[in-house]
Image (cartoon, rainbow, N blue to C red):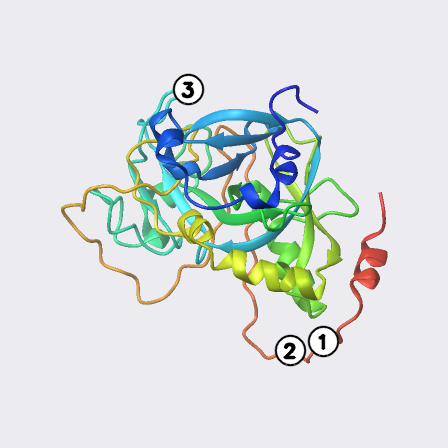
Amino acid sequence: MSKEIGMFEGAANVPAHLKGGELSETARALGAADGGLKRISIKGSVFRMMVGGQQVAANEDRAMKVVIVASAPGYARTYYGDSYKEGEKSAPACWSDDGNAPSEHVENPQSPICASCPQNIKGSAVNGGRACKYSARLAVVLEGDMNGDVYGLNIPAQSIFGDVDSEHHLSLQEYVRKLAGFGYDVVKVVTEMKFDTNSPVPKLMFRAVRALTEDEWETIQARGESKDAKVHTSERKFTQSDDGGESAPTPAKQTKSTPKRASKAAEPASDEVEDVDDEVEEPKKVSKKKEPEPENPAISDILDEWGDE
């Protein structure tokens, strides 16, 4: 555990009567930026608490248990081009909140739709992959502090679609699909996120820990509707990037042009994490045929099938 302030223990130890609410003017005046919104960064394969674009604590545990309370609609895409350099703050050249078409806040869209974008072609990146990167934008709470802070969390492409080097964990997309196949919704279970230690870049794997209790489910529904959850998963309006490409939604001026929206959502294509040479497998299309209604086994049955570590 890091010797920095208790990143994930401290929040749980705050007395109930002191939790929540808006930051005081004193806290804001002394530098508590972004209204106190907190994010979890996975830069360097370390769980880091980010507040106002600054790291305030780190937790070097390889796994973390959370509940996913909300997500942005669809997979986001972000293209930096020459504007991003490690350690420097910069806004992306183009981005999409749904993986379908550029955001209306992009000044110079690379293409009217993402599917036909030249930055979506393999080889458009210096490393031979695709220059435009996928990510999943989530809002999560910690298992031990479901009434506490809602954290923003960006999941990179390899953690969404890529193969994982684990017998018991899955990529995010496969994890969500497998849960659904057993009759479980991902927002109704405690999820363990674990770093793939065999990956040269930050890469998360996922598994179900347990189902939520009735009281916990009531809490999670409220957290998913909270202001912080909505901010973390709302459309992005970049002013600058704060930690290697992960940016919280921030107000920005309206742009000059609005790209034409695609009439049909684009199927996610393969992608790679920034600065990685190997490319993730092409995501498979989901059949639209109606499947037989699955039985609804206990979460313990799912855990038994996935095994224990």
- Up the image or down, 145 lies above or below 184; here it is above
- Residue nearest the observer in this picture, 116 or 195: 195
Task: Determine the residue positioned at 42% across, 49% down.
Answer: 76
Local SS, label 1: loop
Q: Position of residue 247 (x, y in %)?
A: 40, 36
- In whole angstroms, how far apart are the C-alphas of marks 2 and 1? 8 Å
For mark 2, does the 10 Å Cα neighbourhood hold few (<14), some (14 to 19), or many (20 or more) residues? few
Q: Amino acid at mark 1?
A: Pro
Residue appearing at x 44%, y 35% in the figure: 246
Spot occupied by residue 53 in the image (x, y as percentages of width and height): 42, 29
Q: Residue at x 30, y 62 (%)?
A: 262
Q: Secondary structure at mark 2?
A: loop
Label 3 neighbourhood size at 10 Å, few (<14), some (14-19), many (20+)? few
The quadrant in which the N terminus is found is top right
Is 267 situated above or below 83?
Answer: below
Q: Which mark is residue 133?
A: none
Give the mark nearer the N terminus: 3 vs 2. Answer: 3
Q: Would you name the residue on which mark 2 appears?
A: 291
Q: Looking at the image, can residue 131 be seen?
A: no
Say whether marks 2 and 1 touch (CB < 8 Å). Answer: yes
| Residue assigned mark 1 | 294
Measured from the top left, where is residue 143 in percent x and y?
67, 48
Amino acid bearing label 2: Glu
| Residue 35 showing in the rendered view | yes
Say which mark, if any, is on residue 87: 3
Specify the amino acid type for callout 3.
Answer: Gly
